[in-house]
Amino acid sequence: MPPALSPDARPGDAGPPTAVRVHGAERVLELEWPDLSAQVPFRALRLACPCAVCVSETTGRRLLDPATVPETIAPQEVALAGNYALRVTWQGGHDTGLFTWRYLREIAAAAHAA
């Protein structure tokens, strides 16, 4: 189960990472800021998807069943969404979650602390 995070981040709440690297063989997304560096497992990132399919917009309850996300999940594409987020296209085509810089930083901080 992913850590409790705040996907309701607004653009401008945090700056972009200085580096974003996809490490397919290690199955992690590496994120770096001047004061934080972390490797987030692909599956943890997928489980943290903030989109309306994965999280109820009215209650905030997580709708995505972790049992439906395979350990081997990997992104097909990681791309900028404007100047404030990353859009991840997952195997199977799921691509509706935008990971804002602030939300990615929260995810990275949780991964770093683990």
Image: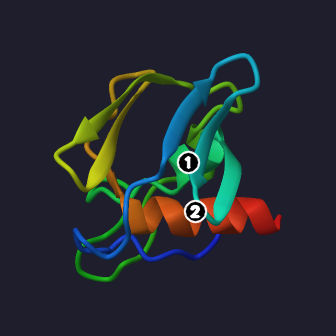
Q: Is disc 2 placed on a helix, strand or loop?
A: helix
Q: Quadrant of the N terminus?
A: bottom right
Q: Residue at x 68, y 54 (%)?
A: 37
Please state which of residues 24 and 58 is positioned toward the viewer in this rendering.
24
Q: Which residue is mark 2?
A: 107
Q: Residue furthest right?
A: 114
Residue 42 left/right relative to 16 = right
Mark 2, other Cα within 10 Å: few <14 / some 14–19 / many ≥20? many
Q: Is residue 67 visible?
A: no
Q: Looking at the image, is mark 2 or mark 1 earlier in the sequence? A: 1
Which percent across, then down, holds residue 21?
56, 31
Three-letter residue code for mark 1: Leu
Q: CA distance from mark 2 to mark 1?
A: 8 Å
Q: Residue at x 30, y 56 (%)?
A: 51
Q: Would you say the residues marked 2 and 1 are in contact, meaning their CB atoms lie under 8 Å apart? A: yes
Q: Quadrant of the C terminus?
A: bottom right
Q: Quadrant of residue 8?
A: bottom left
Q: Residue furthest left?
A: 82
Q: Is residue 70 visible?
A: yes
Of circles 2 and 1, which is in front? Answer: 2
Q: Residue at x 34, y 44 (%)?
A: 86
Three-letter residue code for mark 2: Ile
Which percent across, then down, holds residue 18?
48, 48
Which percent across, then down, holds residue 29?
60, 37
Q: Which residue is mark 1?
A: 45
Q: Is residue 102 above or below residue 67?
A: below
Q: Quadrant of residue 57?
A: bottom left
